[in-house]
Amino acid sequence: MDALTLLNHRNSEPKLTKPGPDREALQKIVAAALRAPDHGRLRPWRFLSIEGKARYRLGDLFVEALKQRKPEASEEEIKKTAEAPLRAPLIIVVIAKQIENAKVPAIEQLLSAGCAAHGILLAAQALDFGAIWRTGDNSYDPYVNTALGLSENETLVGYIYIGTPIGVPKPLPMLPVEEFIKAWG
């Protein structure tokens, strides 16, 4: 698939199953992420891969965090939270590392990590996998972030779930370009 076709047809795949990427495919996906725009070549991102039994441990972590945030959580909420990491065979956690730099503000570093996440989505789709970028309470929870090993200068950008798509993706409308760009000056 050529690059413009990939970019113009990228779509989030919420329903994923096995198989997920093997080691070689994962290497290609992460290599694509490492090509994100990176002012100052700070490499302001890192990634965690979570698969197999580690997904269950992540579910347990999410449940612990939920119980701290919401002690009155229902059994249904707890079950749904525990099963969230099981929605795909692979999860890549994208982490922004904000490095003190006089020329590169923290916002640029965060945006670079966002671009790296987008590279993961595109690479997964180029390799015929489906992927979806998820955030939510567990992306911003200090307890979860500490348990995942984030330091004070790091921000969890999101969880990218990757696997084989189930069913046909929902069609996305082509947006009218002229509504989003205007000539200046």
Image: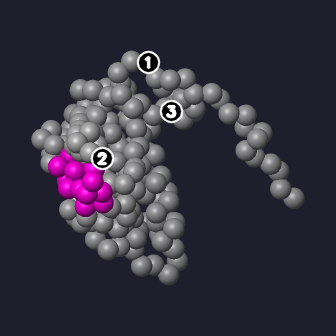
Q: Is residue 158 above or below residue 146?
A: above
Is there any visible trace of residue 111 in the rendered image? yes
- Which residue type does callout 3 highlight? Arg
**Which-is-in-front pick, marks 1 and 2?**
1
Between marks 3 and 2, how big is the CA–CA gap? Answer: 18 Å
Of all residues shown, which one is farthest toward the left? Answer: 53
Magenta residues, start to end = 59-73
120 up-or-down from 10: above or below: below
Q: Which residue is mark 1?
A: 168
- Residue 62 in the magenta stretch? The answer is yes
Colour convention: one colour
Q: Nearer the viewer, residue 165 or 126?
A: 165
Picture quadrant where residue 95 is located: bottom left
Q: Residue at x 76, y 41 (%)?
A: 179
The residue under label 2 is 92
**x then y, percent, for residue 130:** 38, 30
Question: Quick check: 60 left or right of 33?
Answer: left
Do we see residue 45 in this rendering?
Answer: no
Q: Position of residue 155 (x, y in %)?
A: 37, 64
Q: Are marks 1 and 2 in contact (CB under 8 Å)?
A: no
Query: Magenta stretch containing residue 174, yes or no?
Result: no
Q: Nearer the viewer, residue 33 or 64?
A: 64
Identify the residue under disc 3: 10
Q: CA distance from mark 3 to mark 1?
A: 13 Å
103 with respect to 164 (left or right): right
- Earlier residue among tags 3 and 1: 3
Q: Earlier in the sequence, mark 1 or mark 2?
A: 2
